[in-house]
Image (cartoon, helix red, strand yellow):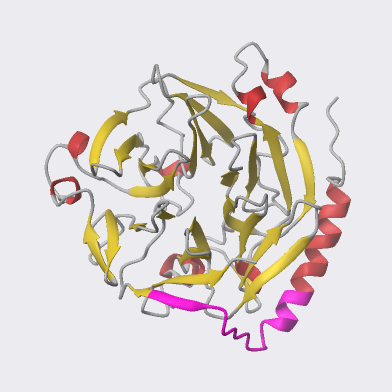
Amino acid sequence: MITFKKCGRVAIIVSVLGAMTSLDATSQQRHYSDKLIPVVDLGKRRAIGVSVSSDNRLFVSFPNQGKDYRYGLTEIVNGQPLPFPDKAWNAHTGDSATRFINVQDLYVDTDDNLWVLDSKPAPKGSIFGGPNGAAAAEGAFKLLKINLATNQVERVYTFDDLDKSTSGLNDMRIDPDKSLAYLSDPGRAAIVVLDLASGSTRTVLSGQPFTTADPHIILTYDGKEMRDRSGNPFRSNVNGIALTKDNRYLYFKPINKLNLYRIETRYLADTSLTDTELATQVEDMGETAVTHGLIADNKGNIYLTSSMDYSIKYLSPDGRLHTLVQDDRLLWPDSFGIGSDGYLYFSCAQLQRDPQWNNGEDKVEYPYQIYKVKLP
């Protein structure tokens, strides 16, 4: 029997109800912070992925979600998103093997390579939720390694051994020390471990309490529950992940869960361990918030986007949870990048304002923005 500290269902329900009461009360107040600095005005183009290189090059990706889509992956140059690595990879037609379909996540590793997760999940695996009655379809996934010294694609991984009928690869982190990639798979409530040498994958920690959404946690904004037209609440299993700079720990959590978890990557690299044995190595880091993106800095802080109270928080190495910035403009803060200039960069996806969750009404506040805030 596997047990976890501070993770009892009663404790979670009580804390969630308390949090919702507090959030509904504070949602009537206006939060504003001079710490929050707009970096890029993106108009009507929703950004998801954000990452920053060691020489402070800023990369931003866009999911392919409709008429305002232009580029899948861009580099921000003089405040403008330019197609990266070139226009061919950002073409709207042609061979899907050599162009972006739906860029989901970006990550610059400790060797300064840019990794790009091009992930179009099956309807069952998407956190965006497919249209009602959507026909079953397979997902399409590839992971690109781009050498930032040359701006050339060096390798493409296609996840040929992955179950693409239910998978929903969402976030990824790269561990050059072990030649592994770690990817969250909310579609199957699991972590996928990709061997970068062979291209083969293993699916681990599937369906565990710490990779599965808590059905009692309903996302609520300004007193309104986030539900689709059929009354189904938004729900996501394991989603945000973070890898410490020494590549020792992988942090992870579902969106619909308050507790944050971690596991030493040496256990993820050990192919002799069963899933049950792996589960015993997961550590519960305690209660945080409803979060989306995660990232670690070189001081051991773990940053978490916290959309229900419009904030960015961080867990310091001493186990304390802090609020870095709180501002009403932080509408579904999503993906992070850390610059060598001492700033934390991030996107705001505004997912809760999409028509799907508002009886067909588009409540997005344009323009979409990339923001930055000074690191503590």
At a point 57% along the width and 79% down the height, the residue shown is 35
**Residue 165 appears in which quarter of the rendering?**
top left
At a point 63% along the width and 57% down the height, the residue shown is 303
Which image quarter is the N terminus in?
top right
Q: Is residue 135 visible?
A: yes
264 is within the stretch colored magenta: no
At a point 49% along the width and 51% down the height, the residue shown is 127
Q: Is residue 362 visible?
A: no
Residue 100 versus residue 198: which sits nearer the camera? 198
Numbered range of the magenta stretch: 22-39
Which image quarter is the C terminus in?
bottom right
29 is within the stretch colored magenta: yes
Q: Would you place residue 326 above or below residue 312 in this image?
A: below
340 lies left or right of 277: left
Q: Point out residue 17 in the picture as x, y percentages from the top left corner.
A: 80, 65
Report the residue that reaches farthest toward the top: 272
Q: Point out residue 31 in the picture as x, y percentages from the top left corner.
A: 63, 85
223 lies left or right of 73: right
Q: Point out residue 235 in the picture as x, y percentages from the top left corner.
A: 59, 52
Q: Would you place residue 350 above or below residue 146 in this image?
A: below
Q: Point out residue 193 in the picture as x, y percentages from the top left corner.
A: 52, 27
196 lies left or right of 220: left
**Residue 95 appears in which quarter of the rendering?**
top left
Residue 80 versus residue 217: which sits nearer the camera? 80
